[in-house]
Image: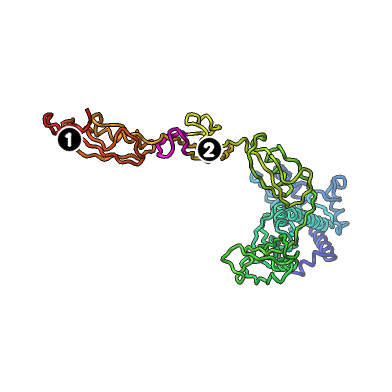
Amino acid sequence: MSDFLSNFSGENYEKTRQEKNKQKEQSDKPERKKIAKPEKKASKQESLADEAVQPEVSFGPQNSPENVGNSTGEQHKNLTNEPEDLIYTKKRIKKKKYEPKKATTTSESVATTPVNQSKNPEEVIETDPTYKKKKIRKFIFLGLGGLAAALLLYFGYYQLTHVKVPDFEGKELSEVRVWTTENGVKLQVEQKYDFAKEANVVIHQNVKNKKIKKGKELVVDASLGADPEEIISLPDFKEMKLNDAKRWIKEQKAENLAIIEEYSDKVAAGDYLKFEITNKDVKAENYKRKDKAKVYFSKGKEVFEKNISVPDFAGKAKEEATEWAKKNEITLKVDEADSETVESGKVISQSVGKDTKVAKKESMSVTVSTGKALVVPDFSQFTAEEAESKANGLQVQVKQLFNDQVPYGQFISQSVEIGKKYTEKEEKPVIQVVYSFGKPYLKDLRDSTLEGDLQKIFYDEYQSKGANITYQVYYVDSTVTKGTVVKMSQYNEFIPINSVVQIGISKGNLKPEENKPSDKPE
C-alpha cells in the first residue's frame, strides 16, 4: 500500500504522469484511423445522436476558448508535443432514457477504445499540478481557523460562566456572603467551634484560588468561637488586680464573665471587691464558658468638686427642684408642710441657700407646700347647735347622749383630737361630737302602755341616747285589759343610765267586782 501511495508523491508522481501520457499517445494513433471512415458514412440519425450525447468542454487554466484550435488535429498535435504539462481524464456521460440508441458500428468502435482514451478531444481538461497542494493548504487553514474560533468561543463562554474564588480563610463570613451574592455562587456554611478563631471567621473552604462555575456551591467552615460548654477553671480573683482579671478573661474567651468597677471608700482602686455567679445552681468548680458571672473591682474613693451652684427654688414647683437634683446627681429630700400663703405643690423653703456651691452626691432638702390646712377645732367651746358651723370645712356629726356626770347640753367628747391638720390631698374623716342629755328621766307608763310598745319606748327614749336602761316584766291578775302595763318599780323620776325597771303586765282575768284597789292613787 505504501508503494502504491509513493507513486503519487513528488518526482514519482511526475514520472507516473509522463508514462501514462506516452501510453495515451500510442493508443490514440490507431484508434483515430479506425474511427475516421465510419464517421463519414454514418447516417444522419446517428450524427444527431452523437451530437446529443457530446459532453460539454471543460477548460483548465491553459485550455481557454481562445487557445483551443478549430481542428482536432491541432489539439492532438499540441497535446502530443507537451505531454508533461497535461493530464487527460475521461468524462463519463450517462445516457438519458429517452435518447436513441447509436449505430452498432459506433458502439463497437467505442467498445474498442481504451479506458484511458478520450472519445472526443473537447472532453480533455487541463489542470494545474499544484492545485491539490493549494486545496489541502486551504482546508488546513480553514480547519485551523475554525479550531481557533471554537477555542475563542469556549474561552469566552468559560470566562462568562466561571469565576475565581479568593482565599477567604481567616476572613469574616460576611465577606464570603457578599462575594457569593455578587458572583452568583451558592454558599453552604458549616459552623463549628474553634477556640483559635473568633466567631464568624472562615476556617476552611472547599475551593480556593481556583475557578468555579456560577451556580455551583461553595462550602466553607465558619467558626462559632470557643465552645460555651467547656468547663473553665476559675482563678482566685481575690489575689488578682483589675488588669490581671481582664487579661485572663481575654485569654480564656470567657465573654460571659463581666468586670464591674465600683467606687469604694475602703478598698483601693484596682483591688478585688467580690465575685458573683448569676445562676445560683452553678458553682465555681463546674463553671462553664456560657455561665454568666460578675467580678467586682474597686475604683477607689469618689471625690467630687464643689462646682454646682444651687438656685433659689422658693415659690417654684416641686418638679423643677427634683429635675435639677437628678440632672446634677444631688440627693434631694422632699418634706411637706401646709402653708397659708404658698399654694399646694410649690416650694416653701430649702436647706441649702441660693448660689451655694455643692458637689455631686451631696444631699439637700426642700419643703413643699400642701396648701392651706384644715385644723380640727375645740368643740367644747361650742354648743351642739354651733358645732357644725364652726367645723372649718370639716364634716361633723353631732350627737347628744345621756350622762350621769355631765349636765344637760354640756360637751362630752369629739372623735378627732383638737388641732389636728388635714391637707387638701389627705382624706378627711367625719368628726363625731357628743353633747350631754344629762340623767335619763323615766316616765309613768301605767294604764297607757301596752307590753308590745315597751321595746320601742326603751330603745328610742333611752338606749339610742346612751342610757343602758333595761326592763323586766311580770304578770299580775287584773281587770285591766290584758297586756297593759299596770305596775312599775320606778316612774316619774331621774334614774341612773344603767338601771333595770320592773314592769307588771295585766293578765285581764278578773271581773270588775273582783277588782282589787289599784296601786295608782285616785
Q: Amino acid at mark 2?
A: Lys
- Residue, disc 2: 428
Locate residue 132 relative to residue 293 in the image: left or right: right
- Picture quarter with the C terminus: top left
In terms of sequence position, does the residue under pointer 2 or pointer 1 come before the other?
2
Q: Amino acid at mark 1?
A: Lys
Position of residue 227 measured from the top left corner of the image (x, y, whole percent): 64, 66
Residue 409 magenta: yes
Q: Secondary structure at mark 1?
A: loop
Q: Quadrant of residue 225?
A: bottom right
Locate residue 31 relative to residue 451 in the image: left or right: right
Q: Nearer the viewer, residue 140 or 249?
A: 249
Q: Nearer the viewer, residue 127 or 234?
A: 234
Work out which residue is located at the far front of the displayed protein and give it. 522
- Residue, disc 1: 507
Cα separation, mark 2 vs mark 1, equals 56 Å
Query: In the image, what residue occupies the spot 86% across and 59% down?
Result: 84
- Picture quarter with the N terminus: bottom right
Label 2 crowd bin: few (<14), some (14–19), many (20+), radius 10 Å: few
Position of residue 301 measured from the top left corner of the image (x, y, whole percent): 75, 60
Q: Which residues are magenta?
A: 397-412
Position of residue 292 measured from the top left corner of the image (x, y, whole percent): 63, 62
Q: Secondary structure at mark 2?
A: loop
Is residue 224 among the parts visible in the rendering? no
Q: Is residue 253 above or below residue 145?
A: below
Q: Quadrant of residue 459?
A: top left
Label 1 crowd bin: few (<14), some (14–19), many (20+), radius 10 Å: some
Q: Is residue 406 above or below residue 24?
A: above
Position of residue 314 measured from the top left corner of the image (x, y, whole percent): 72, 39
